[in-house]
Amino acid sequence: MSLHIIIDGYNLIRRSPTLSSIEQWSLEEGRDALIDRLSSYKSVKHHPITVVFDGTHADSCLERKTAWKGIDVVFSRRGELADTVIKRIVARERERAVVVTSDRDIANFAEGHGATIMDSIEFEKKIEMATQMERMMGDTGGEDEVGWVPTTKKKGPARRPPRQKRKKRARESKL
């Protein structure tokens, strides 16, 4: 089962120190910087990514969906919050969804529908690690594979966590 990463766009931008400083110059540049980072993340991880932005002050009354650099970008309709759009997507995707937000209302809704929640700052760290990995793979050409390394470490936990926690951990490890 592949994961679908759903991101509360402005929430991630405003929680990130680097992206928020870019956004102070221009809202559009902040969105562009986020999408640039997400496209490099996607080139490493290959998960479908949807970023949802508020379009409450937009001229159009229709929800706008575009694909940009391999990332699905959704602007909510006029008078509708991005939270509502995210909830609609989560209700459709259910367990496949990984929701990136620091908004407790969205997080509670998503958890109720079986989705995995990741804090915006925590996901930004994942993006940074993936981009560093991409740079390292570009330098070496990806030809240096590490083979099997013998170990005496025992496999398996002494006590097994509940199934829901194991599923959540498995989904997060794919990020």
Image: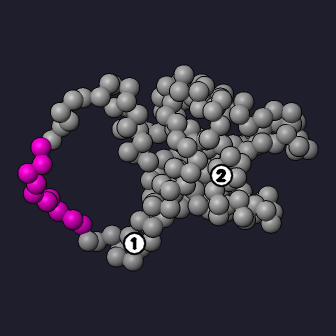
| Mark before the other along the chain sequence, 1 or 2 | 2
**Label 2's element?**
helix
Q: Which of 162 and 88 is in front in this view?
A: 162
Q: Quadrant of residue 77?
A: top right
**In the orientation shown, which residue stands out farthest toward the right?**
59
Question: Could you say where residue 52 lies in the image, as x and y percent from the top left?
Answer: 69, 43
Residue 44 falls left or right of residue 61: left
Q: Residue at x 73, y 37 (%)?
A: 82
Residue at image coords 68%, 46%: 11
Picture quadrant of residue 172: top left
Residue found farthest to the top: 112
CA–CA distance in space, label 1 to label 2:
27 Å
Q: Name the residue under label 2.
A: 15
Going by the numbered disc 1, the residue's amino acid type is Met
* Residue 166 placement (x, y as % from top left): 33, 32
What is the three-letter code of the residue carrying label 2?
Answer: Arg
Vertical comparison of 165 with 5: above or below: above
Nearest to viewer (mark 1 / mark 2): 2
Q: Which colour scheme is used?
A: one colour
Residue bearing the label numbered 1: 136
Residue plotted at (38% across, 70% down): 137
Residue range corresponding to the magenta coloring: 145-154
Relative side of 146 to 9, left or right: left
Residue 146 visible to an observer of this rendering: yes
Q: What numbered label is drawn on residue 101?
A: none
Q: Position of residue 68 (x, y in %)?
A: 66, 55
The picture places residue 136, in percent across and down from the top left corner, at: 39, 72
Residue 163 sits above or below residue 129 on the image: above
| Residue visible at 38% across and 26% down in the picture | 164
In magenta segment, residue 152: yes
The dominant secondary structure in magenta is loop
